[in-house]
């Protein structure tokens, strides 16, 4: 029976989609057609679904083990099997079950400048027309939203604290690789070579989609096209049930909606200063741990 022997476990908004498609291009690696399975965290996620659009967004979770395994039945000659679920890293209590069901899979964690990750997360929900607060107000509401049992995707600041969760993963899994989105974007080929070596596949392979960009950020003008692409609802839910989103669909989507893209306002300097102070200790710990944070906000190191 085919099971994953590696997992891209998160964090959200840190390049997991790009890495998924780059690895899927490697002939020795199998990735299921369906991305973001969230099987091992779906009991947690299903309980926390009281935010606007949470039920629709979480409708496609894989909820039973046999359905999960069926996603890997088309494995042929590939020796490395993976899956991508950015929620796993946020629920360290699921690590033991993952190890019990899958053995000791290799664990890949992507992180990013925590302020940029938080803001990107916020903009994602703005695009989906689920978030209507300003960024600073949304950050102030985070504790209340946790109490109200919103999905963890609403926790912009909490999800940008990486260090303790990385340590929890290291306690459970033998092989854990941490890379930054900044590395993946700036040195894509070299970073993929590191990942290929970690997975013990041909590290000289260069994927054809090396320069492709997925899930472009920013904001989009509202119209029928962008509403269909981004807004959660019955139509989008049905589409996701019927179709597995493939790289060519992502490319087509980006071409179609790219003309409506525009840059959001930058974070206000007073709020940025506040966030720098909140994340500074976290960044120091990550840097001391050996993670390359050199491309992150310079103010963390002042």
Image (cartoon, rainbow, N blue to C red):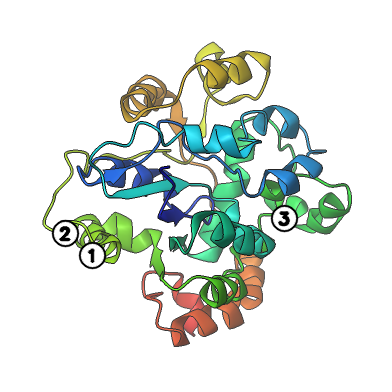
Q: Mark 2–mark 1 contact, CB under 8 Å?
A: yes
Residue that mark 3 sits on = 136
Point 60% across, 15% down: residue? 238
> In which image quadrant can residue 72 be found?
top left
Residue that mark 1 sits on = 197
Left or right of 103 in this view: 192: left
Q: N-terminal of the two: label 2 or label 1? A: 1
Q: N-terminal of the two: label 1 or label 3? A: 3
Q: Is residue 210 above or below residue 296?
A: above
Q: Quadrant of the N terminus?
A: top left
Q: N-terminal of the two: label 3 or label 2? A: 3
Point 67% across, 34% down: residue? 58
Point 60% across, 83% down: residue? 281
Disc number placed over residue 203 in the picture, else none: 2
Q: Is residue 233 above or below residue 17?
A: above
Of residue 275 and residue 255, the one placed in the foreground of this image is 255
Q: Is residue 33 above or below residue 160?
A: above
Q: Mark 1–mark 3 contact, CB under 8 Å?
A: no
| Badge 2 element | loop
Q: CA distance from mark 1 to mark 3?
A: 41 Å
């Amino acid at each position: 029976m085919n099971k994953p022997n590696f997992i891209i476990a998160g964090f959200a908004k840190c390049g997991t989609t790009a890495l998924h498609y780059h690895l899927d291009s490697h002939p020795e690696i199998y990735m299921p057609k369906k991305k973001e399975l969230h099987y091992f965290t779906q009991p947690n996620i299903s309980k926390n679904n009281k935010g606007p659009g949470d039920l629709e967004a979480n409708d496609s979770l894989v909820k039973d083990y046999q359905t999960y395994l069926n996603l890997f039945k088309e494995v042929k000659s590939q020796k490395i099997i993976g899956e991508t679920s950015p929620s796993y890293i946020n629920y360290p209590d699921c690590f033991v079950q993952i190890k019990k069901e899958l053995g000791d899979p290799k664990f890949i964690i992507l992180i990013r400048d925590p302020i940029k990750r938080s803001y990107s997360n916020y903009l994602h929900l703005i695009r989906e027309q689920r978030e209507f607060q300003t960024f600073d107000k949304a950050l102030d509401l985070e504790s209340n939203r946790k109490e109200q049992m919103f999905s963890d995707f609403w926790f912009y600041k909490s999800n940008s604290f990486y260090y303790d969760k990385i340590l929890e993963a290291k306690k459970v899994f033998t092989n854990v690789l941490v890379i930054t989105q900044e590395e993946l974007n700036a040195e894509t080929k070299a970073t993929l070579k590191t990942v290929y070596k970690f997975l013990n596949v041909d590290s000289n392979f260069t994927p054809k989609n090396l320069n492709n960009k997925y899930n472009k950020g920013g904001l989009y003008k509202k119209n029928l096209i962008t509403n269909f692409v981004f807004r959660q609802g019955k139509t989008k839910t049905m589409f996701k049930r019927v179709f597995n989103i493939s790289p060519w669909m992502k490319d087509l989507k980006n071409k179609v909606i790219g003309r409506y893209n525009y840059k959001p306002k930058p974070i206000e300097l007073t709020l940025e200063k506040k966030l720098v102070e909140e994340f500074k200790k976290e960044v120091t710990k990550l840097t001391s741990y050996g993670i390359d944070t050199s491309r992150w906000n310079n103010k963390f190191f002042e």
